[in-house]
Amino acid sequence: MAGKIHYTAPVPGQTHGTGGLLASPLKLLSGTIVWMGGVFVVATLGYVLAGWSVGDAAFMVLTTVYSVGYGQVRPVDTTFLRLWTIMTIVLGCTGMIVLTGALIQVFNLYQFRRFLGLDRMQSEIERLHGHAIICGYGRIGVRLARALTEAHHPFVIIERDAGRAEEARAAGHLILIGEATHEDTLKQAMIGQARVLASVLSDDAANVFITLSARSLNPAVQIIARGEAPTTESKLFHAGADKVVLPTHIGAERITELILFPATESVLGDIREVGTIKRNLNDFGLDLEVVVAGDSGGMTGLTVREAEQRGNGAFFIVQIDRDGGQSIQHPGEDLRIEAGDLIMLVVRGSRLSAGALFNTPPRPARHGRLFIG
């Protein structure tokens, strides 16, 4: 069914990727130590059952598995002792070979981590507090990380793709390689101390699952989630997201704004202070836009007061720039809007409806039952 999300939750303890146990040198080392301990105990008991003392039995097993060959402690002259010794040699010596390889892997692993600075990076992550967690280093994640870096806001990135993770590390970002859908990974990113989490993966199902996991681990964290399908928005809110961003919807709205407010970018785009002004206005639910009064525009020929009344509170006019270079700040209510005027608006509510008022032709005047254009 369209819009339905299908997602298989990860099984706790399941190892992802190739290699299984061999993919983790530490697990291999610990497993081999347990195996060798079991072989030593069982082999020693076998010799004890054959009438040897515990000391002689343990010494026999150690010299056998380490292939030292100092000589037999006692004669191996029975069928049981010969079979038991053969078993000890096969299982013990094989185990020692694996144990030696595991030790080398662990040594190389820590040398490699020290070379890449991974231990230092993890220690820096553990010191974070009030930081942001970015789940996904795709197109949106890259831009978000760049913006937070410029704003000097602490953050850590969770990315499962090794290539993208390397790009993030090369850019100087704190990065964790792993699945953001796993609670262990979120804990490693210090979700309990984070202020905000942004799940910006292109997979709606993964974003829903990350939101659920993050909300259960930290009820106070602010969660901003990305959604591709419009039907995902309600699912993300139900999962615990505080805000949901739909890039497709935002892109369409931005294109519409460029159509309705074509002058905004050219007039305000190069003014540095405008960004700060717009951010301050956004805190109050307002925005700053520029429109051009066309020859047949709906507001052309009206006074400022009449235009604002026509907008029914959707905007108010703060500046009018005319063709001759005249700039009228805080224009009076009786000033009449002329064709070609650049009008700066402080917009409240829907910016699109405010732009439509200036772009649509004027409504015809009604006289009796007739409309006169």
Image (tube, helix red, strand yellow):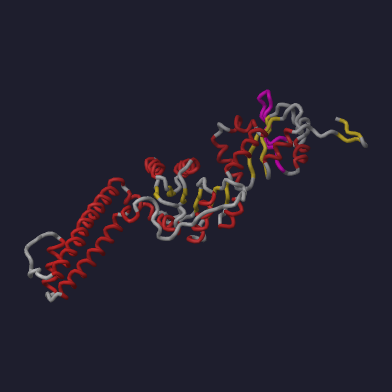
The residue range painted magenta reads 314-331
Of residues 136 and 73, the one nearer the viewer is 73
Q: Position of residue 303 (x, y in %)?
A: 77, 34
Of residues 357 and 68, the one nearer the viewer is 68
233 in relation to 306, above or below: below
Q: Residue at x 33, y 52 (%)?
A: 23
Q: Does the rendering let one see residue 151?
A: no
Q: Residue furthest top?
A: 324
Q: Residue at x 49, y 60 (%)?
A: 218
Q: Is residue 227 magenta?
A: no
209 in relation to 261, above or below: below
Q: Residue furthest right?
A: 368
Q: Does the rendering let one see residue 99?
A: yes
- Position of 353 with respect to 191 (left or right) is right
Q: Position of residue 135 (x, y in %)?
A: 47, 49
Q: Position of residue 183 (x, y in %)?
A: 44, 58
Q: Quadrant of residue 191?
A: bottom left
- Position of 372 with respect to 202 (left or right) is right
Q: Is residue 320 magenta?
A: yes
- Position of 71 with respect to 6 (left or right) is left
Q: How many marks?
A: 0
Q: Where, quadrant-wise, is the C terminus in this rendering? A: top right
Q: Quadrant of residue 164?
A: top left
Q: Position of residue 52 (x, y in %)?
A: 12, 74
Q: Residue at x 56, y 54 (%)?
A: 241
- Position of 220 with respect to 252 (left or right) is left
Of residues 85 and 53, the one nearer the viewer is 85
24 in relation to 367, above or below: below
